[in-house]
Amino acid sequence: MEFEEEEEELIESKPKYSEAEKYRIFDKEFMPHVDSMYNFAFRLTNDEDDANDLMQDTFMKAFRFINSFQEGTNSKAWLFRILKNSFINDYRKKSKEPSKVDYQEVETVYNSTEDAEYESTTDLRIEAVQDMIGDEVAMALNGLPVDFRTVIILCDIEGFTYEEMAKILDIPIGTVRSRLHRARNLLKEKLRSYAKSMGYKELR
Amino acid sequence: MAQCSGNELMKEECENHEKCMKMIQAVLDGSATPDEIEHFKNNIEVCKPCVDGYELEKSIKESLKTKVSKVCCPQKTIEQLKVKIGIGLLLILGLVIKIKVIQEIFI
């Protein structure tokens, strides 16, 4: 498993911080990201209790493996990577989402219908998007399969660069780009449905 | 847009739209390469599907950023976390003290 490999890697690292330093780093580098981490956990799990547990587990792991964190480097990306791995290994199986869709399966299906997808998403109007309230946009986002939802959260809500996302998700930058592109097309499809229900006529 | 250079009139069709949209998204995300940014600047105004695509992507990105509320971590969860980390410290301190006591007795 991905995180098991990571843990082995982390365990091998030599301790370099004193106990006092660990607490100082934890407070200074990790705690400022507590809200972003919780938000990410909540958007992944769609459940407050699971988000609480996932966030706390992540911070406990971060503290446990703090010696593998280089002070002054990108602590937010480091924490997000741990949270994402914890989610995959511990929470995804028991998540309360009704139907989990395997990413590869979605990608395969999507690849086979990419042209058709483009045809059906271009008619979404900018005004419709602008008129939507947050709940509608959030519902469209929450309706995406988790792997697609993840890249949109990381990029558009948390503002990570493609390079940072590649490190968090353990995938090449090219895959980040493709996955984002597909995720956005699926999101547009959801938004188009909402727009239609709001009474906006399609462009053609 | 990728194939639109050199055309003074605005194109109604884009023969490479999927590729163009990936590039447009990278520009909007601030992750485009210098070459992509240059290409974008030189070609965006001559391809209608790309202009429309750019505006729509920008609008959706803006909506996600500003309209989807960020859920803040409950104070209770933060307190629980601090307690857990604090307990960890106490356990370590307890273990250190225990080892020192054992050393003093037996060594």
Image (cartoon, rainbow, N blue to C red):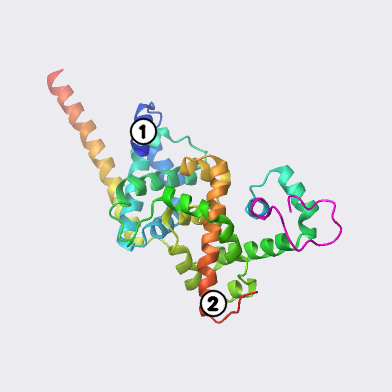
Give the magenta-colored segment's residue range: B1-19
* Residue occupied by mark 1: A5
Displayed quadrant of residue A188: bottom right
Between label 1 and label 2, give the one nearer the viewer. 2
Q: Is residue A106 left or right of residue B11?
A: left
* Residue furthest out toward the top: B107
Residue A160 on the magenta span: no
Q: Is residue A9 above or below residue A121?
A: above
> What secondary structure is found at the residue carrying circle 1?
helix
Q: Residue at x 60, y 70 (%)?
A: A124
Cα–Cα gap, marks 1 and 2: 46 Å
User: Mark 1 belongs to which subunit?
Assistant: A
Q: Residue at x 47, y 43 (%)?
A: A168
Residue A149 location in percent, x, y? 46, 57
Q: Is residue A12 above or below residue A187?
A: above
**Label 1: few (<14), some (14–19) or many (≥20) C-alpha neighbours in 10 Å:** few
- Magenta: main secondary structure equals loop
Q: Is residue B67 above or below residue A183?
A: below
Task: Inspect the image, locate mark 1, and give the three-letter code of the amino acid beneath it.
Answer: Glu
Residue A64 location in percent, x, y? 33, 38
Verify CB contact (< 8 Å) between mark 1 and mark 2. no
Q: Residue at x 71, y 54 (%)?
A: B15
How many numbered discs sit on the rendered protein?
A: 2
- The quarter of the picture where the N terminus of chain A appears is top left
Q: Nearer the viewer, residue A34 or B21?
A: B21
Q: Nearer the viewer, residue A201 or B70?
A: A201
Residue B10 on the magenta span: yes
Q: Nearer the viewer, residue A41 or A65?
A: A41
> What secondary structure is found at the residue carrying circle 2?
helix
Task: Inspect the image, locate mark 2, and give the three-letter code of the amino acid beneath it.
Answer: Lys
- The quarter of the picture where the C terminus of chain A appears is bottom right
**Of the image marks 1 and 2, the number of the one nearer the N terminus:** 1
